[in-house]
Amino acid sequence: MPLGDTKKHVFTGFQKCCYPFQKFDSDDERRFAVLVDSSHETGVIRWMKPGAKQFQIEYLAGKGYEPDFVVETGAEKFIVEVKAKNEMTDEIVLAKARAACEWVGYANNHADENGGKKWSYALIPHDEIKESSTLAGLIATFRRE
């Protein structure tokens, strides 16, 4: 349930979010959160938008960023970025994607050694988040290695 404009207000009512209140940087992120929160086909257990300094991935020397979303299903964990279609080839976006894929590689090595869940990274264009979209379909289409 929105408590106002996406960028300025807090949203509530999510069932699978780790936090009772959530802010989004765009309506596209909010729509993705609704899709993930209501997703039944993929077995979403929980999701979150990491807060400042909560989950940092360094993409350039001394420069880090927080991923848009972390989603956990019964079988896997995902780092998901939602970006405007016209930003998909932006060099900073691509640098962050490369760094996230590298982080996923390290996380998967750790998971293999310790019996944890596999991680994946997906960079999803905003215009692909539709009412008919599913998390499984978006991940299958936009997963990066």
Image (tube, rainbow, N blue to C red):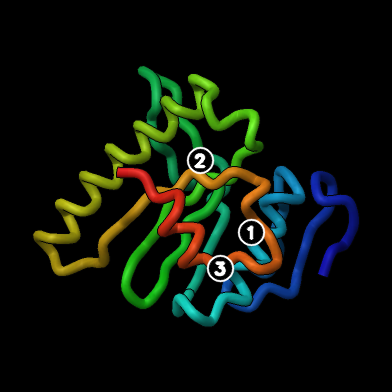
Front-most of residues 59 and 141: 141
Q: Is residue 76 above or below residue 129?
A: below
Give the secondary structure at mark 1.
Answer: helix
Find numbered disc 3 in the image and state the secondary structure of the residue it sits on.
Answer: loop
Quarter that holds the C terminus: top left
Q: Position of residue 10 (x, y in %)?
A: 79, 57
Mark 1 or 2, closer to the camera: 1
- Image location of residue 100, percent across then percent down: 37, 39
Asked whether, in this view, residue 6 is left or right of residue 93, the answer is right
Residue with the mark numbered 1: 32
> Disc 2 designates what residue?
66
What whole-number distance in Å separates the C-alpha atoms at marks 2 and 3? 23 Å
Which residue is found at the position 24% from the left and 51% from the top? 107
In the picture as drawn, the residue positioned furthest to the right comes out as 4
Tag 2–tag 3 contact (CB < 8 Å): no
Give the mark toward the camera: 1 or 3. Answer: 3
Amino acid at pointer 1? Phe
| Depicted 76 relative to depicted 127: above or below | below
Q: Toward which corner of the image does residue 26 lie, by quadrant?
A: top right
Measured from the top left, where is residue 6 in percent x and y?
81, 51
Identify the amino acid type marked 2. Answer: Glu
Q: Relative to residue 50, is residue 72 drawn left or right?
A: left
Rendered residue at 42%/25% (across/down): 95
Q: Is residue 13 above or below residue 60?
A: below
Q: Nearer the viewer, residue 19 or 70?
A: 70
Report the quarter where the N terminus lies.
Answer: bottom right
Front residue of this view, candidates 74 and 126: 126
- The amino acid type of the residue labelled 3 equals Thr
Q: Earlier in the sequence, mark 2 or mark 3?
A: 2
How far is mark 1 from mark 3, CA to CA?
A: 10 Å
Q: Residue at x 32, y 40 (%)?
A: 101
Instruction: Kindly identify which numbered label has been placed on residue 134.
Output: 3
